[in-house]
Image: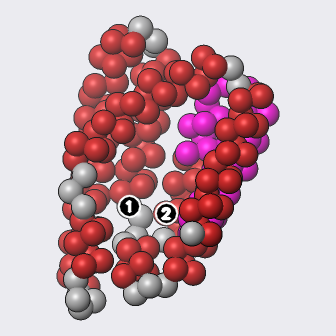
Amino acid sequence: IITRWSSKLLGMINTVVLARILSPEDFGIVAMATIVITMLDSMTQIGVHLYVIRQKEDDPRVFNTGWTVNLIQALIIALFLVISAPWVAVFFGEEAVTNIIYCLAIIKVINGLENFGIYIAQKQLNFNFDFRLTLYTRLSYTIATIGFAIWLESYWAIIWGQFISVSVGFMLS
């Protein structure tokens, strides 16, 4: 509960501060690109982590296979994003969406490289690790996004914040 509440609180603080610094157009441009990746994620979600958590025994082969499947899924989504980026920009009538989608593809691949340790910790009811990982990635996103928003005053702050957050999550996992 504390993990979710702290994450929501940091998200709320981040949104309020960014709403004061960035323009509504900045949020809209990022939302256009995010829609595409969210749709792809939801259509390709196969629940590998749920399978790992439900296994009675800790089998490294299952963990390795789950990690590999997640990475392959991330690579396929990233490839589709890179290929479709120009068409998505034409569809939305916003050329800036192309570069954002390219960046989100890189972020997706980094996210796919994350260790399966978080799911193993959840399986073993080690919520301390889950809390720290969630808190540190969310805190890094908030600090990076606000810092970049003050410096850049553009939608790139959100993208850089995501990149920093996913990188921190990757390193901590």
Nearer-N-terminus badge (2/1): 1
In the rendering, at what x and y percent does residue 93 appear? 41, 8
Residue 39, compared with residue 13, is above or below; it is above
In the rendering, at what x and y percent does residue 156 appear? 61, 31
Type of the residue with mark 1: Leu
In the rendering, at what x and y percent does residue 27 appear? 58, 25
Residues under numbered marks 2 and 1 in contact, where contact means CB atoms less than 8 Å apart: yes
Give the tally of numbered discs.
2
Task: Tell me if 172 is positioned left or right of 20 in this view.
Answer: left
The disc placed on residue 128 is none
Q: Magenta residues: mostly which secondary structure?
A: helix
Q: Which residue is mark 1?
A: 113
- Which corner quadrant of the image does residue 88 belong to? top left
In the image, residue 113 lies in the stretch drawn in magenta:
no
In the rendering, at what x and y percent does residue 10 appear? 68, 52
Front in this rendered view, residue 133 or 69 = 133
Task: Tell me if 143 is positioned left or right of 42 in this view.
Answer: right
Q: Find the magenta span and give its range.
A: 133-162
Type of the residue with mark 2: Phe
- Which corner quadrant of the image does residue 106 belong to? top left
Give the SS element for disc 1.
Answer: loop
Task: Tell me if 137 is positioned left or right of 36 in this view.
Answer: right
